[in-house]
Image (cartoon, coloured by chain):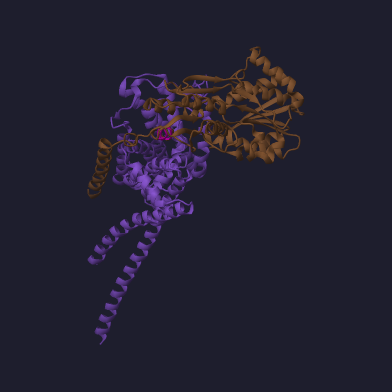
Amino acid sequence: MRRVTRFAAAASASALLALTATACGQSFAEANRASHAGVGLAFDIGGRDDHSFNEAAARGTENARKKLGVNVKMLTAKNGETEADREQRLASFAEAGYNPVIGVGFAYSRSIENVAKDFPETSFGVVDAVPQGKNVDAMVFAEHEGSYLAGVAAALKSKNHKVGFIGGVNNALIQKFQAGFEQGVRDTDPKTKVTSQYLYPNNDKGFNDPAAAKAKAGGMLDSGIDVIYSAAGQSGAGAIEAISKRKGAWAIGVDSDQYQQPGLAKYKDCILTSVVKNVDVAVFDLIKSVEDGKPLTGVHAYDMKKKGVTLATSGGFIKDIQPQIDAARQKIVEGKVKVKETP
Amino acid sequence: MKTLTRSFTKDKVLLALAAPLLAIAAAFVISSLVFLASGENPLRAYWIMADYGHYSDSQVWIINKAVPYYLSALAVAIGFRMNLFNIGVDGQYRLAAFAAAAVGGAIALPGALQIILLIVIAMLVGALWSGIAGVLKTSRGVSEVITTIMLNAIAASVIGYFLQDGRLAIKDGNLLHTRFLPESSHFFSFPTHPKPVYGFVVIAALAGFVYWFVLNRTRFGFDLRAVGASEPAAEASGVSVKRMVVISMLLSGAAAGLVGMPTLLGESFNYGTDFPAGIGFTGIAIALLGRNHPVGMAFGALLWAFLDRTGSRLEFEGYAQEIVGVIQGVIVLCVVIAYEIVRRYGLRAQQRKVGEELAAQARTNENDKAEATA
């Protein structure tokens, strides 16, 4: 009996404490109202220094800092986050007066939608997703079109006629990269075999596990594949490292021009090209529109026609096949080639 | 002899208080050292955390975040109480939530019926998945640590296979998720300010009570604890250890099935690529933190959620993001070590006392004997 009473007392005391505390307390937003503080940038898994996707967004804010003189604050997502964590991150920006608040990555899709409702005066932006909301700018990219060109380059450069694709996580977004790449290879050289593999079926760890990408690339190289395109955020660096150790093998980078990344300088001689997603341009556009007092809202598609996705030429490794690549780009821009979004 | 038992209970209370106090003090000291080593002022950090934590939106957030943590800790603790390490809570709750979401999106029963059905499905699927590990352990002698870890990976792949466009998922931008649950399966919530608290907090409290009652007030719970304390002794007194292993694995998995329910029925209303993962592992830390005690784990879950909430605030204030992870780890280690130190100290003190008492008795006997012969 003694234990029962003790248990009941402890439970009811803590429940009472919790409910009284929540019922009459003040919320943080009410206690701390702030005005214009700058740009809030919330990164996806991997953080600023992923040499890839997040880095591209950071470059956009960097430009804005230089050209528009705005202040920038960045926060990074952790592995295994819940919706609540993401909402808190975005809300803490908005509460502190950051405007616009930008979520980098489709993981922020729902959280942007929810938080944007609570802060109607603030402009929100999200990359790779189309959430609803009057104060939301959705920036989407034609990854499949850029990846198509990577497929063309891979098919032309592969000596063994075997090319590979490594995706970080098997989700709808990365499937766009895979679909475009496979189609590009097939349309250029039907005899070239494409092997597509993913690091994780559905764990966001796929975007910050370079060791897994390194092992995956190693396996592909051993089977004779000599051009590997990885779309895996920070993990991609692992694949590039493995490829750099194999003579005659090429890596194709993603999101940023990875040849130019200081963190990857050691391996840059094996980086054939990169499918550049101009997230920086989209981010800059939004910041500028907010600074000008006419914030962008609705869906903004950055496709090949608008140069939202491009193929990097740094290093000059694809100079010899540039005519074929330009021809393929032309066909996409003119709509003669329709690139599929799902493999 | 009477004085001896009384002093034991007094010591017991002192020791019971000593362990958490020691753990808290040690955690504070080590965390402060970590802050200092990274060139930050620990006092300012604690102040930021306390200040941010006291706002109502923080408290609602913390309670909502703690509910799945607590359920996960319960699932782990059921295993812990009989020396079974169910590392697979993560896979169990995800597969369970996925199955419940898939069924829930396909049918629409009226009101409470639908919710009950979904919860039952989740518990069954969780139990089924952990039951595989239980059966493998009893029939083939495979360690449940290995099988549950493997089953996590298999669960992830199974979900990955079915969570594709055209199978059980629909594509929504770059997200893939199961069909939305109908309105009838939305769980109620408490209208607190500014955001509501999940009604599932009631189920969590109920689960905590059932855990306590079954373990401490039923024959089954006694058998379970007996097996945990000593397998051969339990076997000798007529408990079928194999049966207990399978049943407790099933129960642990059923509890794990509840972990995803607050999110599914209270927030997301579907299972998508953005469904939270990793709560099963947090549950292990919280079960350790709460010493497998239903109230202890509740405090552990709340503490963990508090650190999650205020830790993100620290990042906002310019502290390194990783620092809260370090603090969480330090707290778990401090609790485990402090309890072990206090337990050993208590054991030694008890032995010493018994020894002294016996020696004193022996001395008086000697004296009596000496007097008798004299």
Does residue A185 appear to the left or right of A96 in the view shown?
Answer: right
Q: Residue at x 43, y 47 (%)?
A: B328
Residue B99 in the magenta stretch? The answer is no
Number of numbered markers: 0
The spot of residue A83 in percent (x, y) is 42, 32
Q: Which of the 4 image quadrants contains residue B259?
A: top left
Q: Which of the 4 image quadrants contains residue B30?
A: bottom left
Which chain comes out purple in the rendered image?
B
Q: Does residue A332 appear in this view?
A: yes
* Screen quadrant of the C terminus of chain B: bottom left
Does residue A170 appear to the left or right of A249 in the view shown?
Answer: left
Q: Residue at x 29, y 32 (%)?
A: B193
In the rendering, what colour is chain A?
Answer: brown
Does residue B115 appear to the left or right of A217 in the view shown?
Answer: left
The spot of residue A6 in percent (x, y) is 24, 48
Q: Which residues are magenta?
A: A87-93
Vertical relation: B340 (above or below) A202: below
The spot of residue B155 in percent (x, y) is 50, 33
Between residues B41 and A238, which one lies in front from this camera angle? B41
Q: Does residue A225 appear in this view?
A: no
Q: Residue at x 29, y 43 (%)?
A: B213
Residue A92 in the magenta stretch? The answer is yes
* Screen quadrant of the N terminus of chain B: bottom left
Between residues A18 and A253, which one lies in front from this camera angle? A253
Q: Which of the 4 image quadrants contains residue A324?
A: top right
Vertical relation: B226 (above or below) A323: below
The spot of residue B13 in percent (x, y) is 28, 58
| Secondary structure, magenta segment, majority class | helix
